[in-house]
Image (spheres, grey):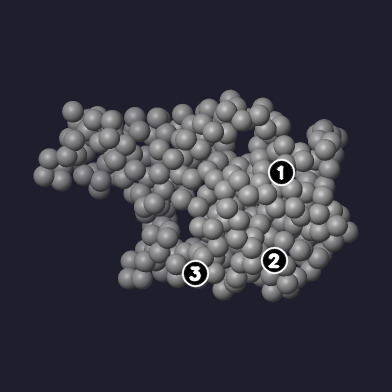
Amino acid sequence: MKLCGCNPHFSPYVFLGMILVKSVELAEGVHVAIGPHFPQCNTVVLVSETVTVIDPGCPLETLRFTLRKLGKEINDIDYVVLSHIHPDHITHASRIERTSRCRIVANDITAPLFDEKEEMKCFLGFHKGELVRPLWENLVNERMYGALDEGRTNFVVKDQEEISLGDHTLRMVYTPGHLPDHMCIELVESNLLYSADIDCTEFGPFYGHWNSSITEFKQSIEFILSSNYEGLISGHLGQPLLREFKDPLKSFLRQFDVREDLVLLEISGGARTLGEIMAHPLIYPSLSNPVFLYFEKWMIEHHVQELLKKGKVWLKKNQILPT
Ligand SMILES: [Zn+2]
């Protein structure tokens, strides 16, 4: 399949009224409707005799614009494929299903979470009674409206399973760590990998849930580094296609060590509890939003666990001490 070059004279940005929308074609029939930043994501649009969207978390106007450029409407979508359960990636899936009667495809961990939103909330650590839960729900409803709508998946796919959707074949690639259900999605004909939240952003890796795993996240990145894909499609970069992805991915991987050093520095400087380590923001540049404070807390907890495993710190009467 032919990959498309970037035309420097063509701006992918278009104003629709007051709204700036952007989409790019990466290969024959492979388009990306660009989000790109949290709480939105890049949405892959595949058009042949069927219309497929992967991770419908871009602004709805951008998705509509991208489809119309290809002579299609939201009603024409046949399949929505999900990489994982995060609200910024599933945002419009239920709404699209209601208007187009499309099929929703998700992996065997994501599917039951999508089908039962209470399960999803618990999976993400926002159990009933948690003080942060209503704040997180408000954040989702204000900035990712639709993600908590009831909906049902129709197809469940497993790791390495291939699905044929018109001219396009997708292969699910299990890449846990960010969350236990995180999968990248290989576009077989173009040999591109939609890497979802292994996104190579400047922020770095996100593992801000109780069930995220630094070890698994690193293994998933190492797996992609050992691959020979033609390029990565980031879930969150404004220029979504990284053809030379290995150096950016190595920089992304190094962020784990940078953050671990920051946590260790706080402990060496006298911080003895999670609260004391979190006296200053270490990962988020600002902790103005209490939900982000939770994400930061979970990420720092994961680093403390890593430091314990490596023997760089130890616990004495619930105090974290340097070795
Ligand atoms: Zn995510």
As drawn, is 288 to the left or to the right of 278? right
Residue 41: mark in rendering? none
What separation in Å lies between label 3 and label 1 (alpha carbons)?
29 Å
Viewer-proximal residue, 189 or 53? 189
Q: Residue at x 85, y 61 (%)?
A: 72
Q: Given contact means CB atoms under 8 Å apart, are the residues at marks 3 and 2 in contact?
A: no
**From the viewer's perspective, is the residue at label 3 or at label 1 nearer?**
1
Mark 1 highlights which residue?
Answer: 187
**Mark 2 or mark 1, which has the lower sequence index?**
2
**Mark 3 or mark 1, which has the lower sequence index?**
3
Q: Is residue 101 above or below residue 124?
A: below
Q: Residues within 10 Å of mark 1 (few under 14, many from 20)?
A: many
Q: Where is residue 77? Give x, y as percent.
A: 77, 63
Q: Helix or strand or loop: what does disc 3 sit on? A: helix
As drawn, is 255 to the left or to the right of 4? left
Mark 2 highlights which residue?
Answer: 103
Q: Residue at x 54, y 58 (%)?
A: 108
Q: Helix or strand or loop: what does disc 2 sit on? A: strand
Residue lying furthest left in this view?
A: 317
The residue type indicated by label 1 comes to Leu
The residue type indicated by label 3 comes to Lys
Q: Residue at x 18, y 28 (%)?
A: 323
Mark 3 highlights which residue?
Answer: 117
Q: Where is residue 179? Give x, y as percent.
A: 47, 50
What separation in Å lies between label 2 and label 1 (alpha carbons)?
19 Å
